[in-house]
Image (cartoon, coloured by chain):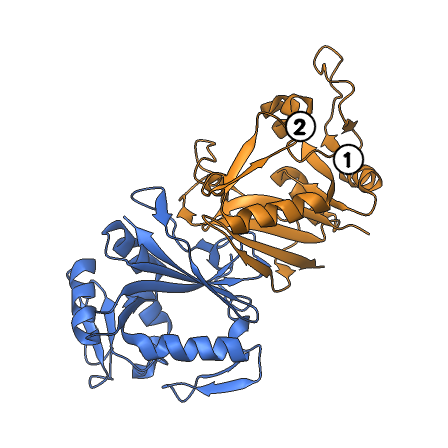
Chain colours: A orange, B blue
Amino acid sequence: MGRVFSNMSMSLDGFIEDAHGSVDQLFEWYTSGPVETKTANDGVTFNQSDEDAELMEQVVAGIGALVTGRTLFDLTQGWGGSHPVGVPVVVVTHNVPTAEEWPHQDAPFTFVTDGIEAAIAKAKELAGDKDVVIASTTIAQQALDAQLLDMISVDLVPYLLGSGKPYFANLANKPVRLENPTIRKGNRATHLTYEVRY
Amino acid sequence: MGRVFSNMSMSLDGFIEDAHGSVDQLFEWYTSGPVETKTANDGVTFNQSDEDAELMEQVVAGIGALVTGRTLFDLTQGWGGSHPVGVPVVVVTHNVPTAEEWPHQDAPFTFVTDGIEAAIAKAKELAGDKDVVIASTTIAQQALDAQLLDMISVDLVPYLLGSGKPYFANLANKPVRLENPTIRKGNRATHLTYEVRY
């Protein structure tokens, strides 16, 4: 059975965007090495260190579905209907986009309007034995509060941003105790994965 | 020549105290293992994992002087004149305590009233070839802003606290770029040390 985990690139001081909404520093590890990796989206190619490329390959191979929020979906214009990870995407939203708003009707995107539990249930169904990954701080927060998040994955980036958007901003129950992490070194990111202990 | 570094236990979400000023969760790694270590202060004993005890021994052996702020000095009542690390302590303050206020006149404590640069210069002089460690977020911040901080050391603790006091709250110049860290595993803390790139 797959696990449900969130994954974000985060600065050492806890931000997943700087105060201007930029992720340039946080995503340096996608472009800081010699190994070129093509993705399921033709427009997106990574150039990473050996360690980062290997990690990314393993993580991506384990992902069966993604859950995202409407904000990121809109910001990326739904990845043009083709998410780089190449798996089904569940979008948590209040309103399903119309056919005019979302021309990629054949793309593997599912819009769920009845909350986080339904969205994760749908994603698990789509993922089968693989993992469900949440790529949205708002959705990750909701999943954590609902005790649906098995693991928190952090690509910890060697920058102090000083301000910006935190990974987990408004915990319903705190503190949240995590297990000791698994740790993998990279170039411009240290990859930490923590199991959540509820 | 020794280096100047700051060292704090910090939650995964970036806090060095919770919203109530407690460090109970953050200091679990001092008491989460079988290895008992006595300190220079008779009242303070640690019980740590093998890895944490070994790390602590190595770090402590490298420290030649500590720099702290007046708040922590007052909070701990000057460690009764005997800091657990057993090295000279430089206290950055606006007012030198009187002999009544500070009865440990023979203890290796130096009070510096003319700012961060003078305090670090004094600490380096006292430390000789060893390291100067800053154990105060305010002083660490000032040292970083003055480009006097060589390294930032973090004992990264597997908790989300949700709110509290950040390690670096008000950076004069941001972002601050750090090098890839050295990484050591522990029990209830992952030990990361970053060189600062100015």
Where in the figure is residue B197, as x and y percent of width and height? 30, 50
Residue in the image at 33% along x and 65% along y: B71
Q: Chain of mark 2?
A: A
Where in the figure is residue B18, as x and y percent of width and height? 51, 59
Q: Which residue is mark 2?
A: A70
Residue type at mark 1: give it: Gly
Q: Which of the two discs, 1 and 2, labels the residue nearer the N terminus?
A: 2
Pointers 1 and 2 in contact (C-beta within 8 Å) = no
Q: Which residue is mark 1?
A: A115
Residue in the image at 53% along x and 72% along y: B29
Residue type at mark 2: give it: Arg
Within 10 Å of disc 1 (Cα), the crowding (few <14, some 14-19, many 20+) is few
Dot label at residue B185: none
Q: In the rendered image, which quarter is residue B123 located in?
A: bottom left
Labels 1 and 2 within one chain: yes
**One can see residue B56 in this view:** yes
Q: Secondary structure at mark 2?
A: helix
Q: Secondary structure at mark 1?
A: loop
Task: Please state which of residues A11 and B139 is positioned toward the viewer in this rendering.
Answer: A11
Where in the figure is residue B43, as x and y percent of width and height? 43, 87
Residue in the image at 58% along x and 61% along y: B158
Task: Please state which of residues A110 and B74 is positioned toward the viewer in this rendering.
Answer: A110
Q: In the rendered image, which quarter is residue B148 located in?
A: bottom left
